[in-house]
Amino acid sequence: MSVYDKLTQLGIELPPVSVPAAAYVPFAKTGNLVFLSGHVAKKDGKPWVGKLGENITTEEGKLAARAVAVDLLGTLHAATGDLNKITRIVKVMSLVNSTLAFTEQHLVTNGASELLAEVFGTDKGAHARSAFGVAQIPMGCCVEIELIAEVA
């Protein structure tokens, strides 16, 4: 099954690449690697604002991370022209806007990691990962994620 068949099966439509909010590009390619800039969580097309442990639950944060992964897939498609060219999701780094007491950043980030494994399969979708709690994310968003992928 192709990546696009899997996306259709999951009811996911790839979004267009978001216009950068500052002085950077959405992605950079070098050799067979594609580095995607951080993507912030959006809900209904607007920044998904909030802080885990204060006004957003772990389950809501997980949904936000999944939404970020969908946006990352749209950018990855734009960067490669064909998601079927992806040979491996190499690394995911997740920043979770959290209170000092919140310690479930890894569970929030599973929202993105699990979607990537669903879309690419366990061989290509399994990746190295970091999940950090941070004091703030641009625009007050609850989650920001960046990704590195290997392309054939």
Image (cartoon, helix red, strand yellow):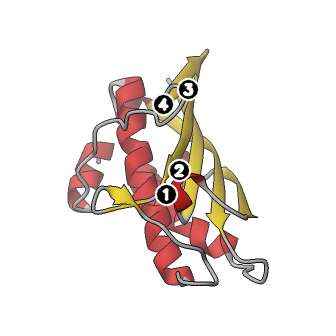
**Rounded to the nearest whole Å, what is the CA distance between mark 3 and mark 1?**
31 Å
Circle 2/circle 3 CB separation < 8 Å: no
Q: Which mark is residue 23?
A: 3
Comparing 42 with 23, the one in front is 23
Judged by depth in the image, the label closer to the viewer, 2 or 3, is 3
Q: Which mark is residue 100?
A: none
Q: Residue at x 28, y 38 (%)?
A: 16
Residue identifier under label 1: 117
**Rounded to the nearest whole Å, what is the CA distance between mark 2 and mark 3?**
30 Å
- Using a 10 Å C-alpha cutoff, classify the residue at mark 3 as few (fewer than 14 neighbours), some (14 to 19) or many (20 or more): few
- Using a 10 Å C-alpha cutoff, classify the residue at mark 4 as few (fewer than 14 neighbours), some (14 to 19) or many (20 or more): some
**Extreme-right residue of the structure:** 100
Residue identifier under label 2: 125
Element on which disc 2 rests: helix
x, y (%) of residue 14? 27, 45
**Which of pointers 1 and 2 lies earlier in the amino acid sequence?**
1
Q: Residue at x 33, y 29 (%)?
A: 82
**Which amino acid lies under the numbered mark 3 shown in the image of this protein?**
Ala
Q: Which mark is residue 26?
A: 4
- Using a 10 Å C-alpha cutoff, classify the residue at mark 1 as few (fewer than 14 neighbours), some (14 to 19) or many (20 or more): some
**Which of pointers 4 and 1 lies earlier in the amino acid sequence?**
4
**Which amino acid lies under the numbered mark 2 shown in the image of this protein?**
Gly
Position of residue 65 relative to residue 6, above or below, is below
Element on which disc 3 rests: loop
**Rounded to the nearest whole Å, what is the CA distance between mark 4 and mark 1?**
22 Å
x, y (%) of residue 10? 27, 62
Q: Is residue 61 visible?
A: yes
x, y (%) of residue 83? 37, 35
**Which amino acid lies under the numbered mark 4 shown in the image of this protein?**
Pro
**Rounded to the nearest whole Å, what is the CA distance between mark 2 and mark 4?**
21 Å
